[in-house]
Image (cartoon, helix red, strand yellow):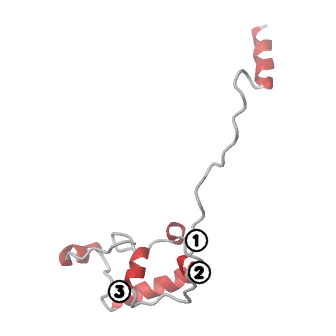
């Protein structure tokens, strides 16, 4: 008899009222800053803008983290690599420790 009562209750939904369903992964969709500002390309000399796309360890941040579109992410990667080659940006954290210059995220 008790098993019949349980099966009836589970089909009705029990004593609790139905909770409204929320989306599992919330948050706002990230937008490309280059597209918003209508900038056609990434300039390797604009170190302040490029520092936002580099981690504190000196690595290039992925698209899913920064929110840039594919076209501009490719341009950003190329610009960062050029800036590193010209010693405008550090390659590794060891360089940052020695010089004392830490990239500021904006």
**Is 88 placed left or right of 70 in the picture?**
left
**Is 16 placed left or right of 103 in the picture?**
right
Rendering quarter of residue 28: bottom right
Is the residue 76 above or below the residue 19 in the image? below
According to the picture, the residue beneath numbered tag 2 turns out to be: 35
SS class, disc 2: helix
Mark 3 touching mark 1, by CB under 8 A? no
Q: Which residue lies furthest to the top in this view?
A: 1
SS class, disc 1: loop
Name which of mark 2 and mark 3 comes first in the sequence.
2
The C terminus: image quadrant? bottom left
According to the picture, the residue beneath numbered tag 1 turns out to be: 31
**Is 62 placed left or right of 47 in the picture?**
right
Name which of mark 3 and mark 1 comes first in the sequence.
1
SS class, disc 3: helix
Residue 76, x across and y down, in percent = 48, 83
What's the mark number on residue 84? 3
Residue appearing at x 32%, y 87% in the figure: 88
Q: Which residue lies furthest to the front in this view?
A: 37
The foreground one among 52 and 10 is 52
The N terminus: image quadrant? top right
**Is 80 placed left or right of 16 in the picture?**
left
Rendering quarter of residue 89: bottom left
Residue 100, x across and y down, in percent = 20, 75
The foreground one among 70 and 38 is 38
Mark 2 touching mark 3, by CB under 8 A? no
Between marks 2 and 3, how big is the CA–CA gap? Answer: 24 Å
Residue appearing at x 60%, y 64% in the figure: 29
Mark 1 touching mark 2, by CB under 8 A? yes
Classed neighbour count for the residue bearing mark 3: other residues with Cα under 10 Å, few (<14), some (14–19), many (≥20): some
């Amino acid at each position: 008899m008790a098993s019949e009562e349980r099966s009836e209750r589970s089909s009705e939904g029990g004593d609790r009222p139905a909770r409204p369903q929320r989306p599992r992964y919330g948050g706002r969709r990230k937008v490309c800053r280059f597209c918003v500002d209508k900038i056609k390309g990434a300039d390797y000399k604009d170190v302040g803008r490029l520092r936002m796309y580099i981690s504190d360890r000196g690595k290039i941040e992925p698209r899913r983290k920064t929110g840039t579109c594919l076209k501009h992410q490719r341009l950003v990667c190329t610009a960062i690599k050029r800036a590193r080659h010209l010693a405008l940006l550090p390659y590794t954290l060891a360089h940052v420790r020695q010089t004392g210059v830490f990239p500021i995220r904006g």
